[in-house]
Image: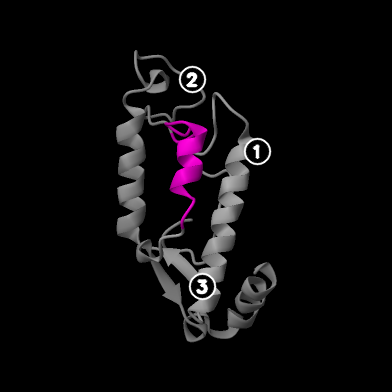
């Protein structure tokens, strides 16, 4: 998800690819997380959710800190895993099981929930999407 963009769920987004396991395992974990998020959103009576900018920044800092210990960013090598400034935004920096554990429980504290009135005229389509998904 991306701060500022309600209900934008990215499957196989930044730092979710693997260099050592099946991407299907990662996709399954992400889909379970999305469904848990949508169920929580519906229970709250909201029509959307968006991560806070603070939560997003903290998560990205955590990812990059873990990345520093890995061969993919050490030694001055270049690869398609790295951006032009040397930042790895492609690979997950841990075991696939750690990713699944991380996404195993939806934590609402990192999100802001969007009411029907916030969406304005487009709220019905988002609400229908959430109701169909859960």
Mark positioned earlier in the residue sequence (2 or 1)? 1
Residue that carries the numbered disc 2 in the rendered image:
79
Q: Quadrant of residue 50?
A: bottom left
Residue 37 drawn at (x, y percent): 52, 64
User: Residue, x 49% and y 67% (percent of image)?
Assistant: 6
Q: Which of marks 2 and 3 is in front?
A: 3
User: Residue, x 35% and y 14% (percent of image)?
Assistant: 76
Q: Indicate the secondary structure of the residue bearing disc 1.
A: helix
* Residue at mark 2 to residue at mark 3: CA–CA distance: 39 Å
Up the image or down, 36 lies above or below 118; here it is above
Q: Residues within 10 Å of mark 3 (few under 14, many from 20)?
A: many
Q: Which mark is residue 35?
A: none
From which residue to which does the magenta span run? Answer: 89-105
Q: In which quarter of the image is residue 2?
A: bottom left
Residue 108 drawn at (x, y percent): 40, 65
Q: Which mark is residue 41?
A: 3
């Amino acid at each position: 998800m991306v701060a500022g963009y309600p209900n934008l769920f990215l499957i196989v987004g930044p730092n979710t690819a693997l260099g050592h396991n099946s991407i299907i395992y990662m996709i399954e974990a992400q889909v379970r997380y999305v469904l848990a998020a949508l169920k929580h959103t519906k229970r709250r009576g909201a029509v959307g959710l968006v991560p806070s900018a603070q939560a997003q920044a903290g998560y990205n800092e955590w990812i990059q800190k873990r990345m520093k210990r890995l061969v993919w960013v050490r030694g001055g090598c270049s690869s398609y895993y790295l951006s032009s400034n040397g930042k790895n935004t492609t690979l997950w920096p841990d075991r696939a099981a750690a990713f699944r554990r991380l996404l195993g429980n939806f934590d609402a504290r990192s999100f802001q929930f969007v009411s029907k009135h916030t969406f304005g005229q487009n709220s019905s389509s988002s609400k229908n999407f959430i109701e169909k998904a859960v």
